[in-house]
Amino acid sequence: MNSSPSEQKRTIVVTGASTGIGFEVARQSAMRGARVFLVSRDPGRLEVARRQILVGAPEAELETFPTDLSSLKEVRRLAEEISRRPPVHILLNNAGAVFARRQLTPEGHERTWALNVLGPFLLTNLLKPTLTFAAPARVVNVSSAAHRSGRMHWEDLEGEQRYRAYRLYSQSKLAVLLMTYEMARRWRSSRISVNACHPGFVRSRFGQNNPGLYGRGFRILEMLFGISPKRGAETPLHLAFDPVGGSHSGGYFSHGAPVPSSRRSYRAGDALRLWELLEDQTGLRSSVSPAGDGRSPASLRLDAASMGTSG
Ligand SMILES: NC(=O)c1ccc[n+]([C@@H]2O[C@H](COP(=O)([O-])OP(=O)(O)OC[C@H]3O[C@@H](n4cnc5c(N)ncnc54)[C@H](OP(=O)(O)O)[C@@H]3O)[C@@H](O)[C@H]2O)c1
C-alpha cells in the first residue's frame, strides 16, 4: 500500500496492538507511513508484533509500550510517557476483553469495567493535550454490536452482586458508546473527532483468555463464523484515516458506514451520569482546574508544553 503525503507524519496510538484487530490496524497504519505506538501488556508479544510489522514496512517508526490498561496507575504512566513523544493525531482505544469469572484489578475494580471502560476513559482524557496539539485529531473507540443487549446496571456496575460475563461485557460496550457520545459533545470545539465502531465478529484471540469451555467455545465460534482480523480492522482504519473519521464526530460505525446504535446508548442523562462517575473512579475530577468550566477536562495534568518536543 502506498503512503499518501498527508499520512506520512501522523502518529497513531493503538491499544491492544499485539494481536487481532489492533495488530492489523497497527500493521496497516505503518504501511500507510504513520508512526505507530503499540500498546498491550505482554512485552514479548509486542516485540513479535513489532518485528512482523517491520517485515512489510521496514522503514516504519514503531515504539512499544507494555502496559496493563486495566490499571489506572499504569494508564497514567503510559500517558506521561506518550506525552513526551511527538504529538498524537489518532488514538485507537481497541484493547478489550470478556472474563468468564469475576476478577479484580489491584486497584479493586472488576476487570471488564477497568479494561473496557475506565482505561480508555482515563487514557483519552490524559492524552487530550497531545491530541489538541496535533489537531485535527481523532479518537476511535472499539465498541461492539454486543452493546445492543447491554444495560447500565447502575447499582451493580462491577458485578459484585451478580456476575455474568456477557452482562458485564455488553454493559461495558454500551458504556463505551455513552462515553463516546458525551466526549464528542464536550469536545465539540476542540478539533478532535470522537467516534466508535463495531469491527464485526472477528477470528482473533478474543475470549480465549478464559480457561475451559468458555475459552474453547469462543475459539470454535471464531473459527467457524469469524471474519479475518484484516477485515475486522477495516472500520477502525476507515475512522482513523479516511475523511469521514475527521468530518464526523459522535458516530457509531459498522461495515465502514455510520449506523444507529441502541436506544439506550443515546440517553444523554445516562451519558452525563456515567461521565461523572468515571471522573470520580479515575480520579480525573480532582485534576480538573477550578478555573475550568467543570464540564471540559481541559486542564489535565499533562500540559501542551511537555509534549511538543519532537515535532
Ligand atoms: N473479536 C470480535 O469478534 C470482536 C467483536 C466486537 C468487538 N470486539 C472488540 O475488539 C477489540 C479487540 O479485540 P480482538 O478481537 O482483537 O481481541 P484479541 O485478539 O483478544 O486482542 C486483544 C488485544 O488487547 C490486549 N490486551 C488484553 N488485555 C489487556 C490489558 N489488560 N492491557 C493492555 N492490553 C490488553 C491483548 O494483548 P496482551 O494479552 O498481550 O495484553 C491483545 O493485543 C476489543 O475491544 C473487543 O471487545 C471484538
Image: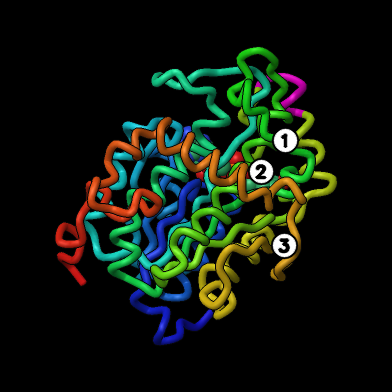
Tell whether 1 sits left or right of 151: left
Q: Nearer the viewer, mark 1 or mark 3?
A: 1
Q: Amino acid at mark 3?
A: Ser
* Residue of label 1: 151
Is residue 80 among the parts visible in the rendering?
no
Helix, strand or loop under label 1: loop
Does 40 sit above or below residue 236? above
Q: Which residues are magenta?
A: 211-216
Is residue 258 among the parts visible in the rendering?
yes
Helix, strand or loop under label 2: helix
Could you classify mark 2 by the number of other residues whose Cα lies within 10 Å: few (under 14), some (14-19), or many (20 or more)?
A: many
Does 285 sit above or below residue 87? above
Residue 174 is labelled as 2
Q: Is residue 195 magenta?
A: no
Q: Amino acid at mark 2?
A: Leu
Residue 254 is labelled as 3
Ligand 1 lies in quarter? top right
In the figure, residue 77 lies in which quadrant?
A: top left
Q: Nearer the viewer, residue 303 or 144?
A: 303
Q: Earlier in the sequence, mark 2 or mark 1?
A: 1
